[in-house]
Image (cartoon, grey):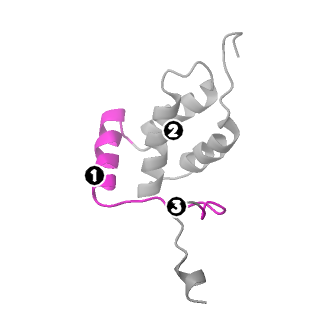
Amino acid sequence: MGSSDQTHPLHASDRETVDRLLAAAQPSEADLVDAARLLMRYQGFPGAADLQDDLAKILRLWQLDRAALHERTKAIWAAGYRPAPAAGDAVGSGFDTTDQENS
């Protein structure tokens, strides 16, 4: 790591996601969306070379380039895809409180 390289605050959790994506022979919609999201996050970021290298490797493994990934994820979102909330994220204005109201 060079002296000007920065450490991204989400590197540890993103490393887990990238490792999962590397193991996906046939990517799911969620895998494609995660790869596109991470490619955007790290584009031009001065650091995290390990993640950037592995994201490029993922595209090669899936036989996609950035343009093809963009087109696929655009279609996925247009078809109504919404990621499932992670555990502990079920709070805030989007949280459905119907079960508690009917108690």
Per the image, the residue denoted by label 3 is 93
How far from the left and from the top, in percent, is residue 8? 65, 29
User: Would you say the residues marked 1 and 2 are in contact, meaning their CB atoms lie under 8 Å apart?
Assistant: no
Q: Position of residue 38 (x, y in %)?
A: 51, 38
69 in the magenta segment: yes
Magenta includes 79? yes
Q: Is residue 102 left or right of residue 10?
A: left
Query: At 36% from the left edge and 39% from the top edge, which residue is drawn?
Result: 64
User: Residue 61: x and y, percent?
Assistant: 46, 41
Residue drawn at point x = 52 percent, y = 61 percent:
93
| Of callouts 3 and 2, the N-terminal one | 2
Give the quadrant of residue 60: top left
Residue 28 quadrant: bottom left
CA–CA distance in space, label 3 to label 2: 26 Å
Q: CA distance from mark 3 to mark 1?
A: 27 Å
Residue 37, numbered circle: none
Q: Residues within 10 Å of mark 3 (few under 14, many from 20)?
A: few
Q: Amino acid at mark 2?
A: Leu
The answer to which image quadrant residue 92 occupies is: bottom right
Disc 2 is placed on an element classified as helix
Q: Which residue is mark 1?
A: 75
Give how far apart the Cα atoms at labels 1 and 2 are.
18 Å
Q: Which residues are magenta?
A: 63-91
Amino acid on which disc 3 is placed: Ser
Tell me if 3 is positioned left or right of 103 in this view.
Answer: right
